[in-house]
Image: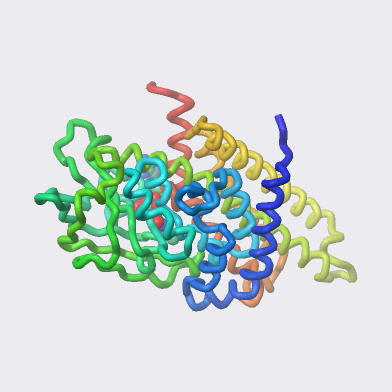
Amino acid sequence: MNFELSKEETDIKMAAREFAEGEIREIAKEHDQKEEFPKKLWKKACELGFVGGFIKEEYEGAGLSFFETCLIMEEFWRVDPGCGCVLLAAFGAEYLQNYGTPEQKKKYLPPIPAGEAIMGAAITEPDAGSDIFGARTEAVKEGNEYVINGSKIFITNGSIAKYLAVFCVTNPDAKSRYNRHSILMVETDRPGFEASKIRGKMGIRASDTAELSFNNVRVPRENLVGGKEGNGFAQTMELFNINRVVAAAQGVGVAQGALELAIGHVKKREAFGQAVGKFQAIQFKLAEMATKVEAARVLTYQAAWLLDNGRTDPKLIAMAKWMAGETGVRVTDDALQLHGGYGFINEYDIERFYRDAKIVEIYEATKEMEKNTIARQLLGKI
Ligand SMILES: Cc1cc2nc3c(=O)[nH]c(=O)nc-3n(C[C@H](O)[C@H](O)[C@H](O)COP(=O)(O)OP(=O)(O)OC[C@H]3O[C@@H](n4cnc5c(N)ncnc54)[C@H](O)[C@@H]3O)c2cc1C
């Protein structure tokens, strides 16, 4: 076993840290308050190869491993989760890289790292979130086209994406519910497509989230990801396996950032004639926080390492995402507490971190669904 980062991994981590410190820290609060996607930041992050870094070099990506992708995500979220979501501009590209036809890969992948296109993956519907089988958006074949009708909700990049990978029912009569859905690429300038930005989010407010409607949206048959119907569920499970690990890295990043904010505060803030960091109760709290962050980090890195080595482990991935999500929530809560009243005021970054951390326990599967996955693997069929 080797717990050390390689020279290349260290360089990537340090480059991501330098970029996040230099480019994100000073714009974070403004984008949170305006609920505005940081377009200039996204372009700069593309120029440096951070966005869609996992896309292979033959499709103009940096060809990074998922572990390296996690290191970048962690560093961006350590400085600001909302602006750190610029890395999600490639969300859904995994579908194409894993399953796309050669033509689909050539068409949709290169514009993402080049900063010419933002992508998203539209799975969740108003009446179907955790229960993905309940997704009703339908794509009906008509000649050489599919006609799509339905709606999606909470879609990251929904109102700024150039194209979206959309989870649709194509085979409603298939015997198995695992074979009823397919993924269709939908360009967002097609007639009948509408996106409405959702305002008033609690956290990651610099990230775009939208409600989508499809009203007789026509796409050619070559937009069917992989060219074969009925594989949407399996393709989406693989997307989740990858992105849950990356989401775990978000939890580690927001927790690490909050811990550092707390350390900085307790060293400066005085009470009863001394820095509050001198009280043992505060020191114990910091020790607990740091230990939780490290435990979540190790689990996340292990899940990412297995993924890169072709040994995807859904149980370990669910453990990493649940643990890192909970660590993000608990550590930001503790860090805010250590700021006292100042933590409750939006002038202080910890107020934003506290709001941002919660999303990791919800998206890419809720923590309850992650525990279902873990328990299912532990128990098998009872
Ligand atoms: C900011 C944001 C960004 C998002 N981005 C995307 C995106 O880009 N693409 C996309 O497709 N979706 C996206 N989502 C949607 C997200 O993945 C869903 O919100 C999430 O999967 C939960 O679904 P739901 O909201 O319908 O909750 P529900 O499924 O209605 O769950 C409600 C509660 O019931 C619990 N529950 C449900 N079923 C079970 C069960 N079997 N056992 C135990 N508990 C259960 C849940 O854990 C939860 O606590 C995003 C959401 C948000 C808030």
- In the image, 279 versus 61, the foreground residue is 61
Q: Residue at x 45, y 24 (%)?
A: 379
Q: Quadrant of residue 282?
A: bottom right
Q: In the displayed orientation, state which residue is furthest to the top.
A: 382
- In the image, 221 versus 121, the foreground residue is 221
Q: Residue at x 52, y 68 (%)?
A: 43
Q: Position of residue 167 (x, y in %)?
A: 29, 49
Q: Residue at x 75, y 53 (%)?
A: 285
Q: Position of residue 59 (x, y in %)?
A: 45, 51
Image quadrant in which the C terminus is located: top left
Q: Does residue 22 appear to the left or right of 91 in the view shown?
A: right
Q: Position of residue 49 (x, y in %)?
A: 56, 58
Q: Residue at x 84, y 59 (%)?
A: 279
Image quadrant in which the N terminus is located: top right
- In the image, 337 versus 331, the foreground residue is 331
| Number of marks in picture | 0
